[in-house]
Image (cartoon, rainbow, N blue to C red):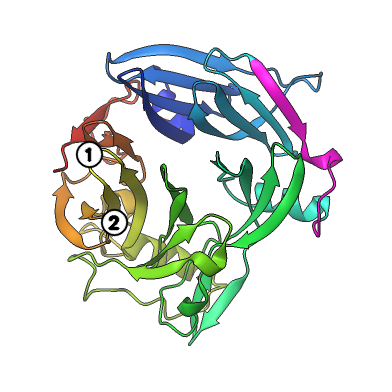
Amino acid sequence: MEGKQYSHKFSQTAYFDNTDWYFGLDYSQNCIDIINLTHQNFHKSLCFINDGSEGSIDVADFYFHNKDSIILLSNFGKIQIINFNGALTDEYDLNSEKADKWVEDELLSGIESGPPRIHYDDLSKNLYIPSYAPVYNTDSHYLSSPTLVSYNLKKREYEEIGSLIPEDIKGKKVSPIIDSHEYNIVKIEPSGNILISYMASSFFSFGKLGASDSLKLFCRTSKFLENNIIDFNGDINDINHQRNYQIQAGRYDKSIYLPEINRFIVSVRHNQQLKDLGGNLNNPFHSDFSILVLNENFKTLKEFKVPKEKYNFNKVYPHSKGVLILKENPNDENNEEDLLEFSVFAID
């Protein structure tokens, strides 16, 4: 697995055929690497032609729905659906379709301006694609409002534009989200509900995908951040201040759902000093982080710290036996860069 540890910018896990699987998109090779976690071996790579010919695609993001439907999205508005064997089963070109209330530049800019986070709802057949996000100013605090474009794969047309923020967040004091794409969506099967985690805020919302009026606002609380929130206190356009804030400030990072035990999991990065004891600038991977466990009503059940500087707080995944975390941290002198190593933490 030479070099694979850092090449998978987008990744996902899935459980089927009594097996845990890991899927990682390798941008440089235009491939999806598939790892069998249960048997701890490399399964295969699904590689795609990108030469402009018919059927070729430059993959920017992917979504594993099931063995028959792996959805690929390019930066240029092309969608392909392949199966687990890599066979092409369907193809769409968003550029050639009628975009209700949207022009091509707006849609593509939304995809290119940050990591595409696509989601598929099997009931409605809607594919949700992120787009531009406006910023709310709430008492001198800023909160980005993610929005989605909804494309129906069955009808091959746009159906609606959904906001990912409930109305009742306005007027609340929240931490700023510097990057408008700093959020993640967690699908809850089979209800079709989603949990939207605003990473730099203690708030998150829960409801139906693409229906902002159904979203309800909740607040999670880490014991490590509860009374120790670092305020931004600066110009949101000051790049140096943004960098320092992102190094120092803790955040609610990756959220996942464990269907087997009906638990919500959040990785929490803790606050840290701007510089280390030697006077060198810290980086986010120096900070401690913990795993916060919530029940189905979003009440905290437990929180435990993960061993320092050995894991990646953003590479946290659902696993059939608990929480899977990539054992990869650039500050770990024993880190094996040519190995993909994971640990599974049991959750009861």
Please give left or right for residue 100 compared with residue 73 in the image.
right
Element marked by disc 2 = strand
Q: Residue furthest bottom?
A: 139
The quadrant where residue 226 appears? bottom left
Q: Earlier in the sequence, mark 1 or mark 2?
A: 2
Q: Mark 2 belongs to which amino acid?
A: Arg
129 left or right, relative to 233: right
Q: Nearer the viewer, residue 259 or 106?
A: 259
Q: Nearer the viewer, residue 300 or 237?
A: 300
Disc 1 from disc 2: Cα separation: 13 Å
**Pointer 2 residue:** 269
**Residue 237 image point, x, y percent:** 57, 72
Q: Is residue 280 left or right of residue 156?
A: left
Q: Position of residue 120 (x, y in %)?
A: 56, 41
Height in image: 165 above or below 170? above
Residue range of the region highlighted in magenta in the rendering: 88-102
Check residue 245 for magenta coloring.
no
Q: Residue at x 19, y 65 (%)?
A: 224
Regarding residue 239, the answer to whether it shows in the image is no
Amino acid at circle 1: Lys
Examine the rendering and report whether any part of residue 335 can be seen.
yes
Q: Check if residue 95 falls in the magenta segment.
A: yes
Residue carrying label 1: 310
Residue 280, which numbered label?
A: none
- Select label 1 or label 2 by which is in front: 2
Query: Dot 2 surroundings within 10 Å: few (below 14), some, or many (20 or more)?
Result: many
Helix, strand or loop at mark 1:
loop
Which residue is nearer to you in this view: 346 or 106?
Answer: 346
Quarter location, residue 1: top left
Between 112 and 258, the residue placed more toward the observer is 258
